[in-house]
Every structure is written in C-alpha cells, then in structure tokens.
Image (spheres, grey):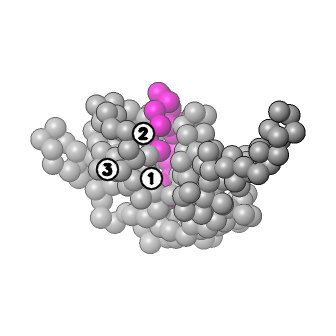
Amino acid sequence: MSKQLTRIESTCVPLNQNNVDTDQVIPARFLKGTTKVGLGEKLFYDLRYLSNGQPNPDFVLNNPKFGGQILVAAHNFGCGSSREHAPWALKDYGFQAILAVSFADIFRNNSLKNQLLAIALPEPVILSLLAAVEANPALAVSIDLPRQVVAIPGQPDQPFEIDPYRKQCLMEGLDDIGYALSHLSWIEQFEAAHA
C-alpha cells in the first residue's frame, strides 16, 4: 500500500520544453535496476550534468531558485518509449505531480499507476503558470484530487479530468494488486458461487 494522495500544495519547477521524452527523463543506460529507489539521482541525467559530470548550471533542477513537488512542462511530456522507470525516477526525486498541456498516453497511465499525478491543463493556463513561476519561484499551487481542481494564485480554479478508478486508487494508496486484494472477500464469494 502506498501513501494516500488527496491534496498537494507546493512550489513548482518550470520545465518549459515540448516533447520531453522518457529517455530524457531517465536515460536507457540506467534501466538495469528493478527497484524504484535511487532513480531520482539519474532523473534528467543528460540534461542535469555536463559531459565532465559537473551539474549543468543552465538546467532548471540545478537552479537553487526552483524546487517543489510539482513539475510544470509544456506539450507531449513523456513521449518516446513506455519505460515505467520514468515515473519511478520522477517520484524518487520528490515530484508528486506534473502539470502539462499534454502527455503521452502510456507515460500518463504509468504515472497514475505509480502514484504520480499527471494533469493536463489548457495551454494558456500552463503558459501563464510557467511565466508566473519563473517570475516568482515562491508561488505555491494546490491540487485537490477529491474535487479535481488545481488552484493557481491569480487564476480561476482549473478543473481536471482523471479516470475514476485511478482517482480511487490514488486516494486510497492502492496499486492494481492492492485494489484487487481490497475486494478479496467479493472475489472469494464469486469463486465459491461458480465452483
């Protein structure tokens, strides 16, 4: 069972790029591990570090002005291969949610299965949020999962869509197996009735 996720209130990290693919999120050479622990150190590795291994001062994760549990990106975040390590790395780094104009479907599904909220908002909202965070890194955004609303200071609340099953799993801290086990008595009754 994972941590129950109902509300996030945090500052944001602005990654104002389109088409961030999963190989940028976690390069393929780091996919040998089978656990989720430690992947945050490799998150955006080729963007975060120069060829000599020193931190890239131009990459947003290395900018001490920005931090928080919410990553804000642009169009088509998580495109490319379907590697589940991408949401694992984002979670291990400390992100709880990604706000973007759009996501690759597989990445979004993998994220939701791994307790990482991937929320699509209209382009004008994301562009305004990116500009606001870049101007004021202390700006805090709140995400209310039960109400399916993102609250951004200075803007009307932004409703978002999420699959009802995934919403329930996030709020109860369950993965697919945990959800099935939570209905074990029903499953056993069904099996007994159909034996």
- At 30% across and 59% down in the image, what residue appears? 63
Sequence-earlier tag: 1 or 3: 3
Label 2 sits on a secondary structure element that is: helix
Along the line of sight, the residue nearer the viewer: 22 or 129: 22
Q: How many residues crowd around disc 2 within 10 Å: few (fewer than 14), some, or many (20 or more)?
A: many
Sequence-earlier tag: 1 or 2: 2
- At 59% across and 63% down in the image, what residue appears? 4
Residue position marked by numbered label 2 in the rendering: 85
Secondary structure character of the magenta stretch overall: loop
Find the magenta span and give its range: 70-87
Q: Which quadrant of the structure image shows residue 32?
A: top left
Q: Residue 161 appears at what percent x and percent y?
A: 72, 49
Along the line of sight, the residue nearer the viewer: 142 or 18: 142
Residue position marked by numbered label 1 in the rendering: 91
Marks 1 and 3, how far apart at CA = 10 Å
- Amino acid type, label 2: His
Label 3 sits on a secondary structure element that is: loop
Sequence-earlier tag: 3 or 2: 3
- Amino acid type, label 1: Lys
Marks 3 and 2, how far apart at CA = 11 Å
Mark 1 or mark 3, whichever is nearer to me:
3
Residue position marked by numbered label 3 in the rendering: 38
Q: Is 12 situated above or below 182? A: below
Q: Is residue 192 left or right of residue 139?
A: right
- Amino acid type, label 3: Gly
Q: Is 160 situated above or below 190? A: below
